[in-house]
């Protein structure tokens, strides 16, 4: 459930960020800098190597073997993107000298690159959350199949939601993987993969929230709940990837699914006597407080740490607590079922 807050927060960010997303890149000096950079291949004392290359990565007036390294081509950094970066840095130095605050360029704060990382702190924190997600899923896997008793005839787990949590774990790791990649280098492909994987996780999390909070055990009933939502998710993801990356539509879809599942878990935690219900409240309250970081939306400190990076930091403990609830839920349900069967 921790990841669902991401979609809600990002959706809010799209709404508020659209107002001043281009304040920096609308500056005539910034645009003039890019134009001159593309012609001369330099910004101040910085020489732009990529401006000596064509769009296919081949050096101008040089033989075929003079090509950029593969890792440079993968990063998709080219003459224009490098000119935008160095012009942005130059503009921000000038603004700082005049006592002006940083502004956004192309909808993003001016981040300083670090090696291959476009937003280093957010990328690293996303990777750490991925590690926590993997550790949580692995712990749950070992608990379900090696620590808790299995049904004597079928060898299956007593816990009715084991398979669903496995799927959730895989989707969650996939989403955080592409989130880390997107913060490493954001371009069209990584953007679509990040959004698609996040929407897939958010949609499945909603299905799982409905099934667990209403304790749906019958397979036919589960199919009836999941089928229309899966059909909608598939259509929505295909629409975003192959027709139009409609941010406005995605905002509505994400906010609706995100709020729905948060309310389901919050109400269920309030009426159930589950021994780990307080962990759900911790995730809900913690996620709600983390929204304040996104709404504050301050520029990156020293060019690296902004409010979104701090939000990523909050996801590490929230992911741990959430998997701890899943772990305890499996133990609780297995204990309840085995006691009844005696």
Image: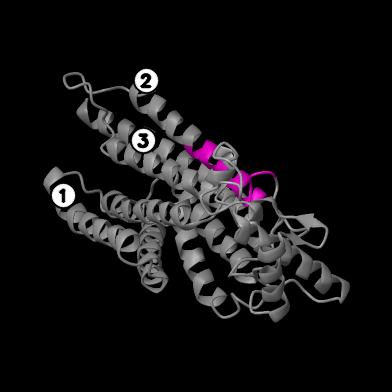
Q: Earlier in the sequence, mark 2 or mark 1?
A: 2
Q: Is residue 317 visible?
A: no
Q: Position of residue 176 (x, y in %)?
A: 48, 46
Q: Is residue 279 visible?
A: yes
Q: Position of residue 328 (x, y in %)?
A: 42, 37
Q: Nearer the viewer, residue 96 or 78?
A: 78
Check disc 1 and report the residue beneath it: 223
The residue range painted magenta reads 115-133
Q: Nearer the viewer, residue 23 or 161?
A: 23
- The 10 Å Cα crowd at callout 1, few under 14, some 14 to 19, many 20 or more, is few
- Residue 292, by quadrant, is bottom right
Give the vertical position of 68 relative to 33 (above or below). above
| Dominant secondary-structure state across the stretch colored magenta | helix
Q: Quadrant of the C terminus?
A: top left
Give the vertical position of 55 relative to 105 (above or below). above
Q: Position of residue 247 (x, y in %)?
A: 42, 70
The secondary structure type at the circle numbered 2 is: helix
The secondary structure type at the circle numbered 3 is: helix
Of badges 3 and 1, the one in the foreground is 1
Label 3 with label 2: CB-CB less than 8 Å: no
Q: Residue 233's mark?
A: none
Check disc 3 and report the residue beneath it: 330
Of badges 2 and 1, the one in the foreground is 1
Of badges 3 and 2, the one in the foreground is 2
Q: CA distance from mark 3 to mark 1?
A: 22 Å
């Amino acid at each position: 459930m921790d990841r669902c807050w991401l979609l809600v927060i990002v959706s809010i960010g799209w709404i508020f960020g659209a107002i001043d997303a281009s304040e920096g890149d609308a500056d005539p000096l910034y645009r003039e800098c890019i134009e001159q950079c593309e012609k001369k291949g330099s910004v101040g004392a910085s020489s732009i190597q990529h401006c000596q290359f064509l769009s296919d990565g081949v050096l101008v007036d040089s033989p075929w073997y003079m090509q950029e390294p593969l890792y440079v081509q993968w990063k998709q950094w080219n003459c224009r993107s490098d000119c935008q970066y160095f012009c942005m840095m130059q503009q921000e130095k000038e603004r700082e000298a005049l006592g002006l605050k940083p502004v956004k360029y192309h909808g993003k704060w001016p981040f300083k690159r670090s090696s291959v990382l476009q937003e280093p702190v957010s990328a690293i924190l996303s990777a750490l959350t991925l590690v926590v997600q993997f550790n949580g899923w692995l712990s749950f896997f070992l608990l379900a199949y090696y620590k808790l008793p299995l049904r004597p005839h079928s060898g299956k787990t007593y816990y009715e939601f084991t398979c669903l949590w496995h799927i959730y774990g895989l989707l969650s790791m996939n989403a955080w993987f592409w989130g880390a990649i997107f913060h490493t280098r954001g371009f069209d492909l990584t953007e679509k993969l990040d959004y698609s994987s996040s929407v897939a996780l958010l949609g499945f999390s909603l299905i799982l929230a409905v099934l667990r909070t209403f304790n749906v055990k019958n397979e036919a009933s589960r199919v009836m709940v999941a089928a229309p939502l899966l059909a909608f998710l598939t259509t929505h993801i295909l629409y975003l990837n192959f027709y139009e990356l409609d941010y406005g539509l995605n905002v509505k879809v994400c906010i609706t699914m995100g709020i729905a599942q948060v309310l389901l878990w919050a109400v269920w935690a309030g009426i159930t006597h589950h021994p780990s219900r307080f962990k759900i409240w911790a995730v809900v309250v913690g996620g709600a407080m983390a929204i304040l970081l996104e709404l504050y939306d301050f520029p990156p400190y020293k060019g690296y740490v902004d409010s979104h990076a701090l939000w990523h930091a909050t996801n590490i403990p929230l992911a741990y607590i959430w998997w701890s609830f899943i772990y305890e839920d499996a133990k609780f349900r297995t204990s309840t079922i085995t006691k009844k069967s005696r």
